[in-house]
Image (cartoon, grey):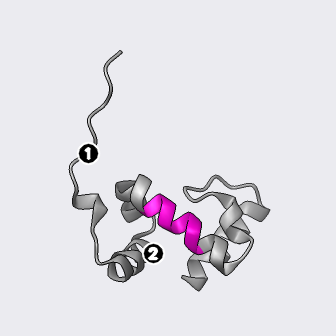
Amino acid sequence: MRAARERLAEDSRYGRPTLLDTYGAESASEFFAVATETFFERPRELQRRHSHLYAELQGFYRLDPASWPAPARAMD
């Protein structure tokens, strides 16, 4: 997780687009919160773009939200 946080801080510093909210670069606890939010809200994208981070969170939570059915989209 440390490497992922350092990468986020670097991306933020240089204005590169990121999947994770750049607020996560503020501290280890904020990084964990941002990574957790992304793990549950955008699991497939996190798994695809940050597979090591996804695997760490998957082990921590003992869940695999990327394997869950996608939520139904609301119809207008």
Residue 1 vertical position relative to residue 64 in the rendered view, above or below: below
Residue at image location 37% in from the left, 64% down from the top: 47
Could you tell which of marks 2 and 1 lies nearer the N-terminus?
A: 2
Res. 52 image quadrant: bottom left
Q: Residue furthest right?
A: 13
The region drawn magenta spans 32-39
In the shown orientation, is residue 51 left or right of residue 73? right
Q: How far apart are marks 2 and 1 (CA)?
A: 21 Å
Residue at image location 42% in from the left, 63% down from the top: 39
Residue at image location 75% in from the left, 71% down from the top: 26
Q: Which amino acid does label 1 sit on?
A: Ala
Between 3 and 29, the residue placed more toward the observer is 29
Quadrant of the rendering where the N terminus is positioned: bottom right
Q: Position of residue 45 (x, y in %)?
A: 40, 55
Mark 1, residue position: 70
Within 10 Å of the Cα at label 1, are there few (<14), some (14-19), or many (20+) other Cα atoms?
few
Res. 15 image quadrant: bottom right
Res. 46 image quadrant: bottom left
Residue 53 numbered tag: 2
Q: Is mark 1 on a helix, strand or loop?
A: loop
Q: Position of residue 38 (x, y in %)?
A: 48, 59
Residue at image location 50% in from the left, 60% down from the top: 37
Quadrant of the rendering where the C terminus is positioned: top left
Magenta stretch: helix, strand or loop mostly: helix
Between 22 and 72, the residue placed more toward the observer is 72
Residue 59 vertical position relative to residue 42 in the rendered view, above or below: below
Q: Which residue lies furthest to the top in this view?
A: 76
Pointers 2 and 1 in contact (CB under 8 A)?
A: no
Q: Which amino acid does label 2 sit on?
A: Leu
Q: Is mark 2 on a helix, strand or loop?
A: helix
Residue 40 vertical position relative to residue 5 in the rendered view, above or below: above
Between 62 and 46, the residue placed more toward the observer is 62
